[in-house]
Image (cartoon, rainbow, N blue to C red):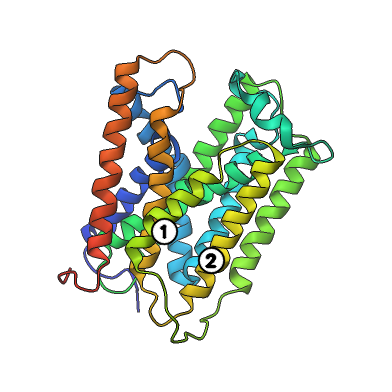
Amino acid sequence: MDQTAGPAAPRLVPALGLALLAPVCAELLSGYDDTTGHPVVLVFMVLVGAALYGAPALLIRETARRTGLGWPGVLLLAAALGIVQAGIIDQSLFSTDYRGIDYWAAMTEPTRIDALGISAITMLTFVGGHMAWSFTAPIAIVEAIHTRGPQRPWLRAPGLAVTAIVYLAAAYFVLRDHYANETDHASPAQLTGAAACAAALIALAFLLRRNPVRRPRRVPPAWALVPASAAAIIASTVSYSWTGFALAAVLLGGGAVAIVFWSRSMAWTPRHAVALASGALYAVVLPSFITDPIGEVDPVAKYANNAVMTLLVIGLTWWAMRRSSPAAPPR
């Protein structure tokens, strides 16, 4: 039986929502770019980003829901495409002077691993950032708001093909722009290593596909995970030093272990996953008020942009939490 049977609108509306939300979460919430505060340019960025971030988010979501990977599989696929994005497409993972950003060296050099040509802290933040904000959090939010009944696929074969083609085209143009305008490129060994790591994560996503036994253990209330996850992520980004990297590894690693433990409880619900995604979005939008954008940005425009993005996150996360509540009205 075709899992995507039924009218197109109920399937395509959430697919379009995910395609548009992914670039917002990936690029706009943090307010780091010189496009901050320029509405027309930001709208253009969302439309272009729908191909670079929204398309792979859709492919991850569709793959996971068609094959029953669950959230661990989504996270592993998202990490794989995060490596592809940062290591192969824009190659920021290996760059020593990306886009001429004046603080790039201060961010990357303290934890640089010369043998690999990467910075440990940016490897964690870039790949983890794509995993959380470009892909996983938007998937969780949109599914909570729009999905009716079981988590069915949204796209049929033609839609999947078009989505893949759009993603590959966007990746090609970004890669071509990188080679045309940047002077620091990844070496063949670095590109091969990035591709191998991505392939290994994809394979692991399918190898670990199973339904763990659920046990009657206590879990925190879902609402408590919103500030807890936001605080842990924000605290993990306080320093670009090895001490900061160690703190990030402890916080994020400890959090991951706790989530795996709690998620195997009978009391764990889809609302807990939405709460974690919500906390991740707050962790990137709240610090935007103290972020200095690249280039010259009018302060009034900057803070107006930050406020609008914060209100957007508040609205979306409230809606998603409400829709995922056991007491929510039928959809």
Under mark 2, the amino acid is Gly
Local secondary structure at mark 2: helix
Check disc 2: other Cα within 10 Å, few if <14, some if 14-19, many if 20+: many
Question: Dividing the picture into quarters, in which one does residue 306 lie?
Answer: top left
Q: Which residue is identified by label 1? A: 276
> Can you say which quadrant of the picture contains the N terminus?
bottom left
Residue 56 shows up from this direction: no
Q: Which residue is identified by label 2? A: 73
- Residue beneath the point at 69% across and 30% down: 95
Above or below, 153 against 98 in this view is below
Residue 316 shows up from this direction: yes
Left-right relation of 94 to 166: right
* Residue in the foreground of this view, choosing between 262 and 320: 262
- Residue beneath the point at 16% across and 72% down: 330
**Of callouts 2 and 1, the N-terminal one:** 2
In this rendering, which labeled residue sits more in front, label 2 or label 1?
1
Position of residue 12 measured from the top left corner of the image (x, y, whole percent): 28, 55
Question: Dividing the picture into quarters, in which one does residue 321 lie?
Answer: bottom left
> Across the whole image, how many numbered discs are drawn on residues?
2
Left-right relation of 322 to 275: left
Position of residue 258 measured from the top left corner of the image (x, y, whole percent): 53, 68
Position of residue 177 measured from the top left corner of the image (x, y, whole percent): 58, 25
* Residue in the foreground of this view, choosing between 321 and 131: 321
Label 2 – label 1 distance at C-alpha? 16 Å
Position of residue 188 measured from the top left corner of the image (x, y, whole percent): 78, 38
